[in-house]
Amino acid sequence: MQAFSDLLERLILTASRNTKVELMVNYFRQTPDPARGWTLAVLTGELDIPGVKGGSIRRLAEDRVDPELFRMSYDYVGDLAETVSLIWPSRRGANRIPPMEDVIEALLGATRPEGERLVAGWLDMLEPPQRWALIKMVTGGLRIGVSARLTKVALAEMGGVEPAEIEEIWHGLAPPNESLFAWLDGDAEKPSPDIKAPFRPVMLAHPLVTKDKRDDPDAIDPAMIDPSIFAAEWKYDGIRVQAVSERGVRRIYTRTGDDISHTFPDVLAAMDFEAAIDGELLIRAPNGEVAPFNELQQRLNRKTVTRKQMEARPAMIRAYDILVEGGEDLRTLPFSERRKRLETFVERTGSDRIDLSPLVPVTSLDALEAARNDPPAPEIEGLMLKRWDSVYEAGRPTGPWWKWKRDPFLVDAVMMYAQRGHGRRSSFHSDFTFGVWREGEDGEDELTPVGKAYFGFTDEELKQLDKFVRENTVDRFGPVRAVTANKEKGLVLEVAFEGLQRSPRHKSGLAMRFPRVNRIRWDKPSAEADRLETLEKMLPADPLFGKSSPA
Amino acid sequence: MAGKTCGQILYGQAMIRPDLLLHPTPKGLYCPPGDFYIDPVRGSVDRAVVTHGHADHARSGHGAVLATPETLAIMDARYGEDFTANRQPIEYGETVEINGVTVWMSPAGHVLGSAQVVVEWKGLRMVCTGDYKRRRDPTCRQFEPVPDTHVFISEATFGLPVFKHPDTDGEIRKLLDSVALFPDRTHLVGVYALGKAQRVIKLLREAGYNETLYIHGALEKLCQLYEDHGVALGPLETATLDTKERGAQERFRGKIVLGPPSSFHDKWGRRFPDPLPCFASGWMSVRQRAKQSGVELPLIISDHADWDELTDTVREVNPEELWITHGREDALVRWAELEGRKARPLRLVGYEDESID
């Protein structure tokens, strides 16, 4: 428990992604089985201890501390595990730290009352940091800024393998994962679990970028492309998925290999085939078209889904590619062959839950350019270009596939609030809330916040922005500073974003996708920034949904 | 039940309501018969009694200031020699009469010169702790409880049962372990300029760390003042940087730099190579709070009493009434209720938590 608790503590306090990976690699290298395997299960959220939940922990604490004092403390601290770990009365002379595996194995075999008794006994023995780790472990939901994906990256680094290799076998593994670690330590062959309907690592694309502002070093200019060797199709704004149905098992995976089948039983039911396909998970609007991303979001991250939700927002897959059919691996075939197989496959499947991503005719680069910026539906993010001769390769190879996104929407907004960044940027104000003008209740124009951006600027620009914030602060709320923003004075930011949705959760009623600072308009008077009406005109046409309910 | 009635204290034949001797006002705790304020928080007053040198307790501009010689020296260092027209130094244990009210000081263990103010009048003894702690601090006198206290006026900065500060030596060890583990990083340790800075430095020396410690300019005067009062702090250097010299910042790698926490978020903090932000404060026991403030290595070192010290001290002093000046009064009042003690929150405003930003 000690090493586990140290790891959790370090992870929660570390902002840098690389340092987090390093911490996990060190831990996995230094910790013996089976403790490290159980830790892996905790970090990836795959350990479920059924008996003891947050409510039990709270009750245990209130048996020992005045409930009123507990409430005041919980109000102050704001986190149950943290409150209980700190408030729990120490029993002098009882400190012994039980090994991780003892704790987990005992809990997995315990009934609810036994589980609670065990946890109370350990809380007596431990110091606050280990108590905190124990409660986090038992109740799940770590909230320490480490995703399952990042954990897999650490495993890959530990074993000197690709993350895709880990994802491929992930669903065939069970904690405490000894065979996985034996392989990563170099002591055994890669485990080959007999996974039904396994995940196949996904093929991704680098962007084509016209602007000189390129984040991705592998991005190239569209002019470099020879359109004659490429097929083109629309890039939809949904969730990239892999739908696999083999030997009676059906699964839907995200592109990082997370199994989201349980969230989409409506799609699962339609997967009456023997194949693995690559496609975009979308919601079909009542008019038969693709619904905005916001509608899909209503169905994501749910443990269970109701019939009503499925009826209101029916999910479907728009098929891009076919990887396996009838047990035959098609990934080594060129895209031209796979596309033919896919067309026949979709036709034969004959379900309205699975349709074919249409090809966009390629005549010239100019025509593509025009199509990219004027797609037939607002839910299209741009184009995908795929070489006709490309095989289906795991990862993000440079050359065979390109994504060519439509130009972003632009709006001139006024900086309203700034917050300090994290990690390397923690001494700079780097998170900016910006707003546009609208008529206030008193008839005077006022700024209404429409989004928050924390990238898009260079280091040099960040210094200038930070300087502006420090010199124009008018108020502070904790780490947030309000800056001068009125008709006479204020900093105009040209904000780029990918799309706009109505959102009842935001004060302005709008939510932007991927907003970032495109340009700092030092020259532009704040009074000339855009108005809310301008943004409202950018909203996609009403997708024929009723009022969307807040999540 | 001699001695206790509702809201009053019976002492001998005389019945004196403690309110007559000290009561809260918007300017701070006021003593009508003595006509003085204890740690006045707002504006200037004719006569102030000051418990210790932190800025929210010791303000500049009062007509007369009664305080320990160390506290007066600290005020002088912070505000300049004109901070008051009339300095009235008083040693621990020495008594003075102010308009018939007896006042004396007992050590509070908070920072150098910190004192509990004892006020006596017509047989009634009231003790105002100012800020205090009970654990060992090599830079100041240990807290001494005052016996036969009728009304104990306590701070409650960490007045919640979640605040139980761990052993201080262990926290210093955590810092030294981290320095050994990351020899290429600069450990930036956030400390308050008065008290915490010198205590952390002294504790590092006691733990065997003899290398030069680098300090922010804001710490210089007070470190010198502690040295002048016999607290040896070892080799200190100001963490200045000759920006013309290339790679000058490299000399801070693997070193410990101390400064006020706010400075680390400022331009000053950017000069250090690969900084590892640490913060020595009682608030650091709450992980979420440490995380929000960007602290990677929280050091739970506090100059205030934690929950157990607060409640143990009340039991030890065993006053007839407990008054609570500032901090989280409600929880301590609730605790007193459960203990069958009489308690009253004063809700004095103007004293700061050890804030982060």
Image (spheres, coloured by chain):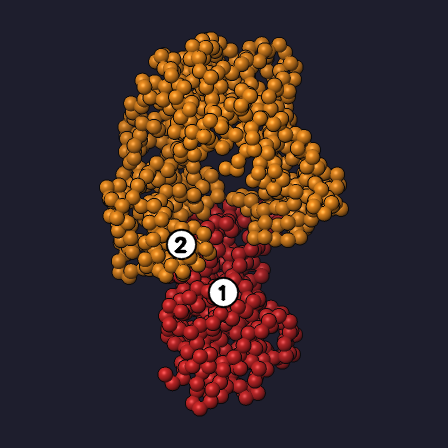
Chain colours: A orange, B red
Q: Quadrant of residue B305?
A: bottom left
Residue A76: give x, y in percent of width and height.
46, 56
Question: From what the image shows, is residue A39 above or below residue B84?
Answer: above
Residue at image coords 53%, 24%: A285
Distance between the alpha carbons at the discs numbered 2 and 1? 18 Å
Q: Image check: B114 left or right of A473?
A: left
Image quadrant containing the N terminus of chain B: bottom left
SS class of the residue under badge 2? helix
Residue at image coords 59%, 15%: A225
Residue A273: give x, y in percent of width and height.
38, 15
Residue ID for mark 1: B327
- Category of crowding for the residue at label 1, using alpha-carbon neighbours closer than 10 angstroms: few (below 14), some (14–19), many (at least 20): many
**Rendered image: mark on residue A158:** none
Q: Quadrant of residue A331?
A: top left
Q: Nearer the viewer, residue B321 or A461?
A: B321
Question: From what the image shows, is residue A339 above or below residue A487?
Answer: above
Residue B297: give x, y in percent of width and height.
45, 51
Question: From what the image shows, is residue A343 above or below residue A112?
Answer: above
Residue B190 visible within the image? yes
Residue ID for mark 2: A83
Which amino acid type corresponds to the residue marked 2 in the rendered image? Thr
Residue B228 visible within the image? no
